[in-house]
Amino acid sequence: MAVKFYTIGYSGRTIEDLQRILAKEDGAILDIRISPRSRKPGFNKKQLSAAFDDDYLWVPEFGNNSDTGGIELYNPALGLEMVKAIYDDSVSDGWNGAVFLMCLCKDAATCHRSEVAQLMREHGYEVTEYQD
């Protein structure tokens, strides 16, 4: 069994919540926001990097680049290349953990992460919304 992919929103969660989830799932975070800044304390890139070390990676290519309220992924082809590299590395290393595609939104149905998940499914990856 290889790496699992989940989508997750950090709205309503704390850093400690994410640390607990990652520990439980042997996980890593792919931050798929176009900008790694947040008004919510603890969720800026520098703070996330400090909290999760090598288990945190910012992937703006999967970020929402639309200013109109719609969804337009910044560079989905490059995002997919990054996911493939992560997947291939996990297979060669024998890692069976989970990668969490993280953004702010609480509701995946109205969030760009649902489009990222669908794009990944179209390319053969299993992606589900994390339920805890």
Image: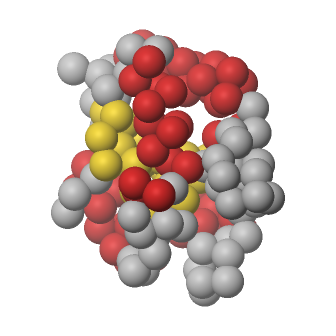
Residue at screen point 79% across, 58% down? 67
Depth order, front residue of 63/24: 63
Please tell me whether residue 5 is drawn above or below residue 131 in the rendered image. above
> Residue 125: image x %, image y %?
38, 22
Residue 12 percent coordinates (x, y): 40, 80
Residue depicted at 39% across the width and 64% down the height: 107
- Identify whether 69 is placed above or below 99: below
- Residue at the location (55% across, 49% down)? 112
Instruction: Look at the picture and state if 24 lies above or below 78.
Output: below
| The N terminus: image quadrant | top left
Q: In the visual, does 77 lie left or right of 40?
A: right
Scheme by which the image is coloured: secondary structure
Residue 68 seen? yes
Q: Is 77 left, or right, of 114 in this rendering? A: right
Label tally? 0
Left or right: 98 in relation to 101 = left
Q: Nearer the viewer, residue 62 or 50?
A: 62
Q: Quadrant of the C terminus?
A: bottom left
Taking the spot 29% from the left edge, 22% from the top edge, the residue there is: 2
Residue 64 picture location, percent across and down: 69, 50
Q: Quadrant of residue 131?
A: bottom left
Q: Position of residue 41 (x, y in %)?
A: 60, 86
